[in-house]
Image (tube, grey):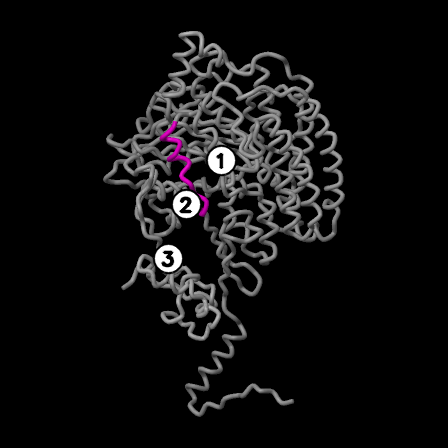
Amino acid sequence: MSALEFANKLIAQFGDALSTPTEFRGEITLVLKDAERVAEVCAFAKNTLGFDYLVDISSIDNYGEDPRWTIVYHIYGYGNHAYLRLKTNVSEEKSELPTVTGVWRTADWHEREIYDMMGVRFRGHPDLRRILMWEGYPYFPLRKDFPLAGKPSEMPDVAFSNRAPLEGGPFVTTPGGKDTIAREPRVRVPETDSLPTNARLERRQDVKEIHEDPRHHSKP
Amino acid sequence: MSSPVQNLEFREPAARAAAAAEELEDLHGQKMVLNMGPSHPSTHGVLRIILELDGEIITRAVPDVGYLHRGDEKIAENMTYTQFIPYTDRLDYLAPLANNVAYALAVEKLLGIDKQLPLRCQFIRVICCELARISSHLLGLGAFALDVGALTVFMHTFTEREKIYNLCESLTGARFTTTYTRIGGLSRDLPPGWVEQCRKFLDEVVVNFDETEKLLTRNRIFVDRTQGVGVLSKEKAIDYGITGPNLRGSGVNFDLRKAQPYLVYDQLQFDVPLGSQGDCYDRYLVRMEEMRQSVRIIRQCLDKIPAGPINVTDGKIVMPAKEKVLTRMEELIHHFILVTQGVNAPPGEVYFGAENPKGELGFYICSRGGGTPYRLKIRAPSFVNLSVLPELLPGHMVSDVVAILGSIDFVMGECDR
C-alpha cells in the first residue's frame, strides 16, 4: 500500500480533523487541524496502520503569522515501508500540545529539543527539561526573533550549587552565585577561600594579581 | 595491637536506638551518584552521564548532552544551501564524506534533480559513502576494543584509517573536512590513478579485517565483556527509533540502502548483516561484516564506474566553468546569481534520510523559495541512539558502561549539532 492510501485511511478515521493530503517530490503531507488530537491520531497510525517508527519531530517558527508554530512528525512503517508527514499548528498564546511519548518512546528527546529550541511545551511529557542548552538558559534560540549572533546570558549556578566532593581542594570549583571567572579555581586567592594552609597557592603571585584586578571581580 | 576504634556507650535509650539505626543504615549503604563525563576517555567526546549506583550496580542513568551544541540549524537558516555543506563535515566528523552526500541529496530532492544526477557522480558518491562507513566503523571498533582493554586493535584499525585519509586527501584536497559534494554534483572528479590506489587499499584493508577479527571475535576477555551485556530487544530498538548497525544488531532488517534505495544502491550486490541477541557483541559483529560489505560495494563501483560528466548541466544550479565565466555573458550571470543568492529552490518541504555509518542521517528542509532554507532540521542518528541509555544502562556494572557506550558508537558533533 502506498503512503497516499494510508493517508486516506487516516482521513476515513478522523474525517474533517485532517486536511486533504498534498504531494510534493513523492512525499505525502497531512495537516491536522486541531493539535489537541495529535496523540490520538498518532496512536491510530501506529497501532492500526503499522507506523511503528517515528523518524523525527521538527518544529517551524512561522514568525509574524498566526498560528506561529508548526510541529512536523515524520513517521515510517517497518512493515509497510511508507513515509508519512503529519503537521499540526499551534498558536503562540497556547504554545502547548499533547505529547506523543506514550505512542513512541523516541519522541522523548525530540520533544525536549523542540521545547529547548522553540519554547513549545508538550503536555504530559515525563521529563520536559532543556536538552541542548543548559538548565536555566533564558531564551529559545531557534526562534526567528532570536539573533544569529546570540544574546549574552549568565552561566547558571545550578550545576555548581550543590556541595561538590573534594570541595575546598585546590582544583575544585566553588558552589554559589559567582560568575564563571570568580568560580574558576585557578584564579582563587587563599584569603577569600577556605584554603589558608595551601602554601603552594599562596606563593603564586600571578594568581593574586589576577584576582585583585577589579575586572575579574563580580562581587563587591 | 589493639583496635583504635572506640565503641561509644549511650546512656539515653533514644540515643542508643538512633546509633543502632545509623549502624544499620551503614550496613545497607546509600545510593551513590557518580558523574561520568563530559570529559572522560570512554565517552568519546563530551557526553555526560549521571549514574545512580547501588554498590557497583547502576540503578538509574541520566544522559546529559549538548556540550558541543553549535546551533547548526540556526546557522543553516542564514546562509545559502551551498554554504552549509562545510558545516555538514562537522556533524559526524568521522564520516564527513557520507554527510556531504546525504545533505546534497536532500537539497537535490527539494530541487527535483535527484534523479537527473549523472551516473558517474552517483557512483563516486556511493564510493565516498562506503569509504566513510569503513573509516567510521574502523574508529568505532578500535575505540570500543580500546575501552574494554584491547589496545592493539586500535593501532591496527588506525593504520587503515590513515590510508583512507590519504585517499580523501587526493580526492578532495582535505583529509578531514572534505566538503566534497556540491548541489547537483561534486567539487572535482577522481584524480588520475585514484582508482588503482583505492583498489590497493581495499586489498590491504581486507587483510586488516581478518587480523582484527582474530584479535577480537574469539578473544575470551572481549567476549566475556560484551556478550549478554547491553541487550537491546527488537521491540525496544524500534520504540526508541534506533537506526543503523545498532538496530540491525537487534535483528531488525532495515537498511535505507535497501528499503529506500538512493543513488545506485539498487544496482549493487550487498548483504545486510543482522544480529540475533542485540548485545554489545552482536553490534560488534554487525559492524565488522558491514565493513566487508562496503568493500564489496566499492569494488563493484570501481568496476562499473562510467566515464562522463560529474555535474548536472543546469547552469542555474551548478557553477559554470571559470573560462566561460570570463568570456560569456550568460555564464557570468549564472555565476553571479549563484554566488550572491544561491540556488533558487522552490517553496515546499522534503525529508531525505540516508544510511550513514551511525544510522539514519536525515535532513528535513522547509523552503519558502529562494537560496536559503526557511528551516533545516537535522535528524541526527547519534542523538536518537543515545536516548536509549536510560533504558539500557540500569542493571549493569559501572565497567559495563564503557562497553555499552563503545558498542553504540556515537559522535557528539552530530548528537549536539
In the picture, residue B170 is in which quadrant? top right
Q: Amino acid at mark 1?
A: Asp
Q: Is residue B114 above or below residue A183?
A: above
Q: Secondary structure at mark 1?
A: loop
For image coordinates 53% across by 22% down, the residue present is B187
**Chain on which label 2 sits:** A
Give the number of the mark in front: 1 or 2.
Answer: 2
**Chain on which label 1 sits:** A
Q: Position of residue B31 (x, y in %)?
A: 50, 65
Q: Earlier in the sequence, mark 3 or mark 1?
A: 1
Q: Which residues are magenta?
A: B66-79
Q: Is residue B229 above or below residue B261?
A: below
Q: Is residue A123 above or below residue B78?
A: below
Q: Position of residue B140 (x, y in %)?
A: 61, 42
As for residue B76 lying within the magenta part, the answer is yes
Spatial distance from mark 2 to mark 3, Cα to Cα?
23 Å
